[in-house]
Image: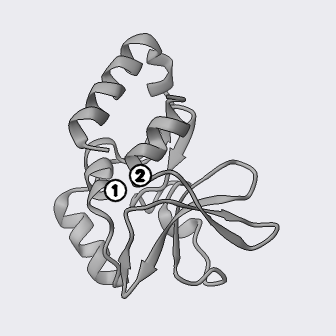
Amino acid sequence: MDLEAFREIVNRARTKKPWLFELEHDSIPTVEDIIAFQKQHKIIFPEKFIWFISNFGGGYFGYANIYSLDRNSCFFIFNHNSSIVKDLLFVADNGCGDYYAFRIENNRCSEEIVFYDHETNVVQNTAFSDVLEYLVKIGLNQ
């Protein structure tokens, strides 16, 4: 999803359902914070994830949540990632113990979102080509 289409969808949703944007959200990291985090943890985030957290932070986004770089938040990305699931970076959950994630290859996260089922330990592809599509579909029900 391109950034302009995402902005338009968010603006329409904010006009129709402003309460979706009144829930807790995390602090917005600076570009320097993001670069330092990626260097420290030897991981490269997808561009659209960087754009999103640079503009919205993390935490609740409509009906969904998205993990953040705010170390003081319950949505801090590394509070939800374990070494048990190799080659995935969890970026959101469904509230039932399952996760939405980026695949990691050579320390680089994919743009595509996959679904991790905690009961079966199975990773499934989704229709979400990036984090913005996930947030529109799950977070805004569109």
Per the image, the residue denoted by label 1 is 49
Mark 1 Cα-neighbour bin, 10 Å: few <14, some 14–19, many ≥20: some
The answer to which of 39 and 44 lies nearer the viewer is 44
The N terminus - image quarter: top left
Q: CA distance from mark 2 to mark 1?
A: 6 Å
Residue 81, position as x, y percentages in the image: 57, 72
Percent across and percent down for residue 91 are 50, 60
Query: Three-letter amino acid code at disc 2?
Result: Val
Q: Residue at x 82, y 67 (%)?
A: 119
Residue at point 22% right, 71% down? 35
Tell me what residue is drawn at x 61 percent, y 77 percent. Answer: 82
Q: Which mark is residue 131?
A: 2
How does the figure colour the protein chain or chains?
A: one colour
How far across and down, in percent of the image, does residue 80 sit? 59, 66
Label 2 environment density (alpha carbons within 10 Å; few <14, some 14–19, many ≥20): many
Mark number for residue 38? Answer: none
Q: Is residue 66 left or right of residue 86?
A: left
**Quadrant of the image occupied by residue 40:** bottom left
Helix, strand or loop status at disc 2 = helix
Q: Residue at x 24, y 41 (%)?
A: 3
Q: Residue furthest bottom?
A: 106
Asked whether the beta carbons under mark 2 and mark 1 sit within 8 Å of each other, the answer is: yes
Farthest right residue in view: 119
Residue 22, above or below 48: above
| Residue 89 sits above or below residue 84 on the image | above
In the picture provided, is 8 more to the left or to the right than 62?
Answer: left
Estimate the x, y position of residue 43 in percent, counting from the top left: 35, 79
Query: Looking at the image, is 40 positioned above or below residue 138?
Result: below
Q: Nearer the viewer, residue 107 or 27?
A: 107
Upstream in sequence: badge 2 or badge 1: 1
Can residue 59 be seen from the camera position used here? no
Q: Assign a secondary structure to mark 1.
A: helix
